[in-house]
Amino acid sequence: MSKTFDIETIQPEQMKKLEVHLCPKLYQRQQDLIYEGQIPHVGFLLIEGEIIFTKRKKIHHKLKPGQTFGVNELLRNYPLKYTATIIAGSKVYILDKSTILELKEEERDLLDSIRIAL
Amino acid sequence: MSKASNKLECENCPSKGQGIFCQLEGMALHDVSDHKVVNSYKKGQTLFVQGNPPYGMYCVSTGNIKVTQVGEDGKESIVRIASAGDVLGHRSIFTDQFYNATATAVEDCTVCFLDKKYILKLVEQSPSVACNLIAKLGRDLGAAEKRISSFYQKNVRERLAELLLLLKESHGVEEDGKIRLNIKLTREEMASIIGTASETLIRFMSELKQEGFIEQKGKVIYILDEPGLLDFANITY
């Protein structure tokens, strides 16, 4: 399966650093996080569970724990080409714009290491 | 990746003057425009789902959004309709609880989003935003109290007339000497708002039409006799 958007995999040591700044959020119910053609409100780093990307109801890609999406699109104001659906019971770290800008100041290396283009 | 979207600036928002940020000026308003994410939602798409974690606040630029709650019996009821200038998800920001309702577009909408940290910073820095948010929470509480008392004190017929008058306040547009309700709700949605069955709603809508209080063309409702409807709703203001 090819992907045409940015998915990054976070290494365990980077995850530890991120944990200082973020707290995990549990999705109790399945939800469409972002619809095809929308700009993500925040970036997501999946800790547990699954996020599924679909286009015209066909599954295109599945995000696995440790992977992140939406940060580059959020910062560049780009729409996502897929609908992202989080499965009930999944846990994520939410990387909102304010947090990303804080990380840019405080944890430049961490941000660079997860290859967020600022 | 596709091309960056053209961003809707707060200065050019169709609902300018009605939102909680509208008293901000110059650089402060520009900063909000710069930070926010603007998206379009199609009819039926959800902004957030009951039981899931909040991470910011939504500000409606155009269109109508229904806010629904699902009870333990699985039955869905509409809590309120958010329209241009309204905000959504603001209570969850301060309470840090999960969303206690689901927000779904009832027609094509444009909605802006600001993250929680940014909102909290704005509240600290801008008294006008804090005051507008408090005023909004106060109005929400007032509307909720009114709705509870209405459920206990009024019958379905009165609640329907009251709903039409409320929709007239929020979505009424003068047209050829009558008032057009600029919102398309299904009968099920209207029945859900006043807490009745669709069949009962249809029966009372017919009654209101026969008595000449309202008129319906397709899905569009017109109010023809507001004083009559006020009397029907048992409202004495």
Image (cartoon, rainbow, N blue to C red):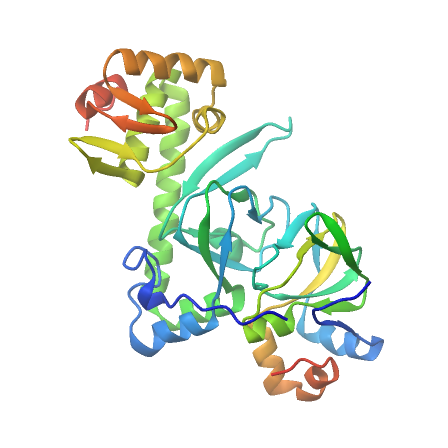
Left or right? Give the position of A5 relative to B137. right
Q: Is residue B47 above or below residue B188?
A: below
Q: Quadrant of the N terminus of chain A?
A: bottom right
Q: Quadrant of the C terminus of chain A?
A: bottom right
Left or right? Give the position of B223 relative to B100. left
Q: Is residue A8 above or below residue B235?
A: below
Residue B114, horizontal then vertical, whole percent: 49, 64
> At 68% from the left edge and 82% from the top edge, which residue is drawn?
A111
Residue A12, horizontal then vertical, whole percent: 84, 75
* Quarter of the view holding residue A2: bottom right
Along the viewing direction, whichever of B225 and B2 lies nearer the viewer: B2
> At 52% from the left edge and 68% from the top edge, which residue is drawn?
B117
Question: Is residue B40 visible in the rendered structure shown here?
Answer: yes
Question: Is residue A98 visible in the rendered structure shown here?
Answer: no
Left or right? Give the position of A100 relative to B68. right
Q: Is residue A2 above or below residue B173?
A: below
> At 78% from the left edge and 76% from the top edge, which residue is drawn?
A16
Residue B125, horizontal then vertical, whole percent: 39, 73
Along the viewing direction, whichever of B69 and B208 lies nearer the viewer: B208
* Quarter of the view holding residue B159: top left
Left or right? Give the position of B181 relative to A39. left
